[in-house]
Image (tube, helix red, strand yellow):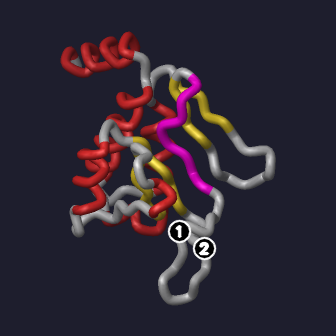
């Protein structure tokens, strides 16, 4: 099945110890955190992510943390995947994806990326407990 925006909310919100932070500006751009650390968030339109043809800012960018620069490079280098980055995020352990392109991923692929994002930000104790539970399931 193809991934959808609703899947991002379900997967990120379904991870343990997660809080969902809502913006005060009335937009539906939540930030998902574990232990006070963001691991998935819906960005506001910014000048670093724009349409090459129109120059308009993308209004549907989701930022997802990754474990390492190597993982980031693997995701953004795979031309079959919709992940990208911008110079603004050079050296930052995250990838970007447009909500409008999530359908290029399967739900399973999206699940793995979001679970890895959670693992990259969770405390060692929480990550160890969750991983142990996954092996038992």
Whether residue 89 appears in magenta in the rendering, the answer is: no
At horizontal 19% and vertical 19% (from top left) the residue drawn is 135
Q: Which residue is mark 2?
A: 57
Residue farthest toward the bottom in the current orientation of the protein: 53
Q: Residues within 10 Å of mark 1 (few under 14, many from 20)?
A: many
Q: Quadrant of the C terminus?
A: top left
Instruction: Using residue 17 as the reference point, say whether residue 137 is left or right of it.
Output: left
Q: Quadrant of the N terminus?
A: bottom left
Nearer to the camera, 119 or 93: 93
Instruction: Using residue 133 as the reference point, say whether residue 102 is left or right of it.
Output: right
Q: Which residue is mark 1?
A: 49
Of labels 1 and 2, earlier in sequence is 1
Asked where in the image residue 68 lies, by quadrant, the reply is top left
At horizontal 37% and vertical 31% (from top left) the residue drawn is 120
Look at the numbered disc 1 and give the secondary structure of its residue: loop
**Is residue 4 positioned above or below 23 on the image?**
below
Nearer to the camera, 37 or 15: 37
Whether residue 37 appears in magenta in the rendering, the answer is: yes
Which stretch did the figure color magenta? 36-43
Asked where in the image residue 129 lies, by quadrant, the reply is top left
Look at the numbered disc 2 and give the secondary structure of its residue: loop
List x then y, in percent, for residue 50.
54, 75
Q: Residues within 10 Å of mark 2 (few under 14, many from 20)?
A: some
Number of marks present in the image shown: 2
């Amino acid at each position: 099945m193809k991934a959808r925006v609703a899947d991002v909310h379900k997967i990120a919100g379904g991870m343990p110890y997660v809080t969902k932070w809502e913006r005060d500006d009335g937009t539906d751009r939540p930030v998902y955190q574990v232990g006070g650390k963001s691991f998935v968030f819906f960005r506001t339109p910014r000048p670093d992510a724009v349409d090459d043809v129109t120059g308009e800012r993308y209004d549907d960018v989701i930022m997802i943390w990754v474990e390492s620069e190597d993982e980031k490079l693997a995701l953004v280098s795979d031309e079959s995947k919709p992940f990208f980055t911008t110079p603004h995020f050079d050296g930052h352990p995250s990838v970007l994806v447009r909500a409008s392109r999530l359908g290029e991923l399967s739900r399973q692929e999206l699940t793995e990326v979001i679970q890895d994002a959670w693992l990259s930000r969770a405390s060692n104790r929480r990550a160890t407990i969750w991983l142990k539970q996954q092996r038992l399931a």
